Amino acid sequence: MSFQQGLSGLNAAAKNLDVIGNNVANTNTVGYKGSEAQFSDVFASSLSGASGINVGIGTALSKVQQQFVQGNIVVSSSPLDMAINGGGFFRMTDNGAVTFTRNGQFNLDKNGYIVNAKGDRLTGYAANANGFVNTSASTTLQISAADISPAATTTVTGLVNLDSRDSAMASAAFNIGNSATYHNATSLSAYDSLGNAHSISLYFLKTASNVWDVFAGVDGVQIGAAKVGSVEFDGGTGAISTAVGSATSFPVTIGAPVATGATTPMQLKIDLSGSTQFGSAFGVNSLTQDGSASGRLAGYNIGSDGTILGRYSNGQSKTLGQVVLANFTNPGALQSLGSNSWGETLDSGVALVGVPGTSSLGILQSGALEESNIDLTAELVKMITAQRVYQSNAQTIKTQDSVLQTLVNLR
């Protein structure tokens, strides 16, 4: 029986070395999870055998168990590289076949889909043209390279200070081309329905104590033949007066004609709320508008919750999709499929899909990768131990052979 015990020990040690060697070979494999060989003792079945005097007949490999502990996270240079900090797997699909992986090395294929080295596509929640994410069902994630649509300017908001020391002038004297006929002016770019930029100018002319007329122009041409509105300030506070009977008519909506093929005239709401009239020089504290030109995709980044945010050349941003993760009640029962991926089994339970950072799912780190969780030092120590075990079992076979040889030599 010692031959059988020694032989089983040799086989077990060889299997253990196979597992250790595989771990060592994958030390640099991104997202790799190390395995551990688990053994059990073996006894011969005997209905009449007395308990307590049976001698085992060796050992057997009972299971190769993968260890899904966290690996170190390192920085990478690609914005599509992702590391999972915590539980969960990336959910991949290849023509409908779903697999799971911890390897976050992704890139774009020719059609804009996010894929791994095998060409499997990453899944998540898709976003529509307006950037709203549909969380009802996961699908393959595709980065659209289409230009972002322009947004026509509808509101211009100004926050200015007008100098109370300026002398009043006649409103009828205003001439957009003569700076001597108004006190101050400011301008900004606004956008029509096709994303063309237009220079919108505001001209301020003091016509009476604490009263200012406001004129407007588009691309250097006066809008209308008269002022677009007036604003009156409180002589005690310098703030805009909204009392009954005051000359204040803002906010006002003006029509700015354009000749670019876009909707004309542009309807612009001019709001000067918060402006002041103090005894200091004219100043523009804020001048904003809510439109934008069309923009090309300039880059993207991925948030900790998996949201893919596209950045465009016009300064705008838009959600392009959201990465989802999947986890299992018993991830140790997943089937290894090679290429650093796993498949769902009956013992693993069904995949629990959700947004990173929720439930048992970890968070994502963009521009980073999860290294193998192999401790190379520990594996080398295990290798030495497995080698000694192999040598020891070989020695038991050698010893049993010597005993049998002695018996054979008896005459």
Image: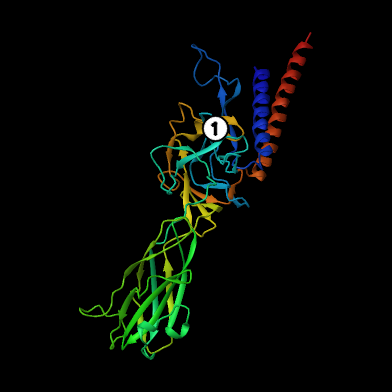
Vertical placement of 306 versus 274: above or below?
A: above
Q: How is the image coloured?
A: rainbow
Q: Nearer the viewer, residue 33 or 229?
A: 229
Q: Nearer the viewer, residue 253 or 49?
A: 253
Vertical placement of 362 versus 157: above or below?
A: above
Residue 181 x, y percent position in the rendering: 43, 84
Q: Can residue 282 be seen?
A: no
Residue 353 x, y percent position in the rendering: 43, 38
Q: Can residue 289 be seen?
A: yes
Q: Nearer the viewer, residue 171 or 122?
A: 171
- How many numbered markers are drawn? 1
Q: Which quarter of the figure has residue 24?
A: top right
The residue depicted at 66 percent of the width and 19 percent of the height is 2
The residue depicted at 64 percent of the width and 26 percent of the height is 12
- Which quarter of the rendering shows the C terminus? top right
Farthest residue to the left: give it. Answer: 244
- Which quarter of the rendering shows the N terminus? top right
Residue 62 x, y percent position in the rendering: 56, 26
Disc 1: which residue: 342
Residue 25 x, y percent position in the rendering: 69, 37
The residue depicted at 38 percent of the width and 39 percent of the height is 136
Type of residue at label 1? Trp
Vertical placement of 113 versus 405: above or below?
A: below
Q: Which quarter of the figure has residue 392?
A: top right
Farthest residue to the top: give it. Answer: 411
